Amino acid sequence: MSKVEEIQQYLQQEGLDAAFITTPDNVFYVSGFHSNPHERLLGVMVFKEAEPFLISPLMEVPDVKAAGWSFEAIGHEDTDDAWDIVKLAVQKRGDLPATIAIEKSHLTVERLERMTHLFPEATFSRIDEQLNGMRNIKSEDELEKLRKAAQLADYAIEVGCKEIAEGKTELEILMAIEFEMKKKGAEKMSFDTMVLSGPKTSSPHGTPGDRKIQKGDFILFDLGVVYQGYCSDITRTVAFGEPSDAQREIYETVKKAEQAAIDLVRPGVKAMEIDKAARDVIEQAGYGEYFTHRVGHGLGISVHEYPSVTGTNELELEAGMVFTIEPGIYHPDITGVRIEDDVAVTADGVEVLTKFPKELVIIQ
Amino acid sequence: MSKVEEIQQYLQQEGLDAAFITTPDNVFYVSGFHSNPHERLLGVMVFKEAEPFLISPLMEVPDVKAAGWSFEAIGHEDTDDAWDIVKLAVQKRGDLPATIAIEKSHLTVERLERMTHLFPEATFSRIDEQLNGMRNIKSEDELEKLRKAAQLADYAIEVGCKEIAEGKTELEILMAIEFEMKKKGAEKMSFDTMVLSGPKTSSPHGTPGDRKIQKGDFILFDLGVVYQGYCSDITRTVAFGEPSDAQREIYETVKKAEQAAIDLVRPGVKAMEIDKAARDVIEQAGYGEYFTHRVGHGLGISVHEYPSVTGTNELELEAGMVFTIEPGIYHPDITGVRIEDDVAVTADGVEVLTKFPKELVIIQ
């Protein structure tokens, strides 16, 4: 069943007339067309029965068609009122809808006010959970793209390790990685690549800079690649020169914590149990106060999506879910270490998509 | 007057109790703290009289303070309900507000529903235009940052021109530019850098790739740099090898169109007249159908902000406004050419912030 048909089925089940989908990532999920329209209107209107349409800036209409959208694609120019065009397209299809599902976690108050004005009789309900639910379970086709994205991320870590040398800056290594990724045909990185060294590893969200790496540093890579619209996200932390015992102990603790979380993944386990499995290892080793974030996040078209793998999420895992597992210890005096993999829940366990080794790499 | 005081004055004038500001760029404008919180809550609550507060993910609170925010900074963790924390902070300051200004073009329907639940007696009005109006007129301090960002963009074009050589790919040139920018201390690029060559210049929004440049190509650079939170945006199109007469004619037409628009900039002129000045030149030369977008957009903390310089915007220019002027001709058979500068409206005319020469550069 196509995504459009799946949404039509949902509308019929819920007794809704139409859905207006506006998150760029959800527009891509439904139509195959990916775009960031900034302040301009981009949306897919799906009806219980009538033909759906996609509205986008006029100059993107050829790209919409090229992306495989087989229904009507309507363009608007900066000088148009895009909402008037939406109304005309809806009227062409019959009665104005009385019940419209919208993405309440994305649609702005201003846009709802416009829609309320265009469709004064309509009531509006949420379609967010339905779309999240659909996206939460990846198809085999989506998994294949995620595997390719993960492969590229593995390779990026390999490139990063090879670039490490006394006196090189974090930024030099970062640029070498990104250049190699572009040459490999990666559309883009999933997010700003992170290469942090020495004391900077102790921040879970530092910014790469001109710091020259030196022997004794741990170097943390956190990066991801977009492949055919799907994201990877990997972290590896490696040693430059012989690590101290204290550094080793932190590394091994994070590695053990990450593996404990991975080992628990299978259908029926709760997301919060995955978080707990990693956190318990770190707490028992006495580093609890230095692990300050959730253990992971869903991954797919967005680099952060559902499910959220926190200590309070009671969601039960199902086959087809894909998320990161990324515990860390950020010790201000010794080093920071984070290890992150992308995992898919299978029918009876787990598939780890990222495969770069996790034995401590020591670069001499 | 600080931005907070300016908003307090607005609340007093309008008889409003509070404003909740949630666009990351507006949070930066008001607080000095820049962050992309993704799905997490980030906002500044300003009261008519009480002390404002900023709410952000807990791990960013030290950065909020480091950015110079001198009022209360409140953190929330993934396991908290951030909105409960907002309510407590508001209650601590006195009666619940009865009138709250929000950014209706940014706040989601879901968040408004949460606020309506927390403050059931409150009515909600727009603060978007007030903030846009404030941001529309740059202070001397902001202009200075925009000048620096423009200088870096000029230098980036210089780097790009030096990188041009037979057989190099668009991506290789692009990466060399971005690397040089990072070395110069640029925080990041304003948007995905564009290096397009040959037939690819005929698309106003192409994607750089593995195409090897060759003699006879025009090469189009569209890029910008962020300096202390402020963006530049420049386009130059240069010739690799001796251009044909047809290519030269298109180049000179765009250059003349761009200059005509610049020459018209001064307080009191309407935005639409700027668009028309460039469009007239291109239409009179017979290329009207190949100029398919507005002539420019506002520029500041965001790479696209107000004012929008379209053929229908009757807004009168005022001193302190900053925007791009970027006419183009996208001829599918000859070449595409776009020339773009960043300009500031001064008390009696215009200051062009980007200064890279516009005489056709011919690289042999």
Image (cartoon, coloured by chain):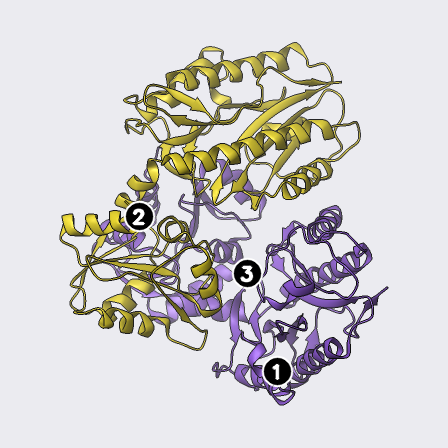
Chain colours: A yellow, B purple
Identify which residue is drawn at 19% across, 57% down.
A48
Q: Nearer the viewer, residue B88 or A152?
A: A152
Q: Nearer the viewer, residue B333 or B82?
A: B333
Q: Secondary structure at mark 1?
A: loop
Q: Is residue A326 in sight in this rendering? A: yes
**Residue A124 image point, x, y percent:** 21, 58
* First in sequence: mark 1 vs mark 3: 1
Q: Is residue B233 in sight in this rendering? A: no
**Residue B276 image point, x, y percent:** 57, 85
- Name which residue type carries label 1: Tyr
- Looking at the rendered structure, which numbered label has been put on residue B265? none
- Name which residue type carries label 2: Lys
Question: Which mark's residue is nearer the viewer, 1 or 3?
Answer: 1
Q: Secondary structure at mark 3?
A: loop
Provide the residue designation for mark 1: B287
Label 3 Cα neighbours within 10 Å, binned few <14 / some 14-19 / many ≥20: some
Provide the residue designation for mark 3: B302
Q: Mark 3 falls within which chain?
A: B
- Name which residue type carries label 3: Ser
Quarter of image, res A90: bottom left
Identify which residue is drawn at 20% across, 48% down.
A10
Residue that lies at the very extreme toward the bottom in this rendered image:
B284
**Residue A346 image point, x, y percent:** 36, 24
Identify which residue is drawn at 30% across, 28% down.
A318
Q: CA distance from mark 1 to mark 3?
A: 31 Å
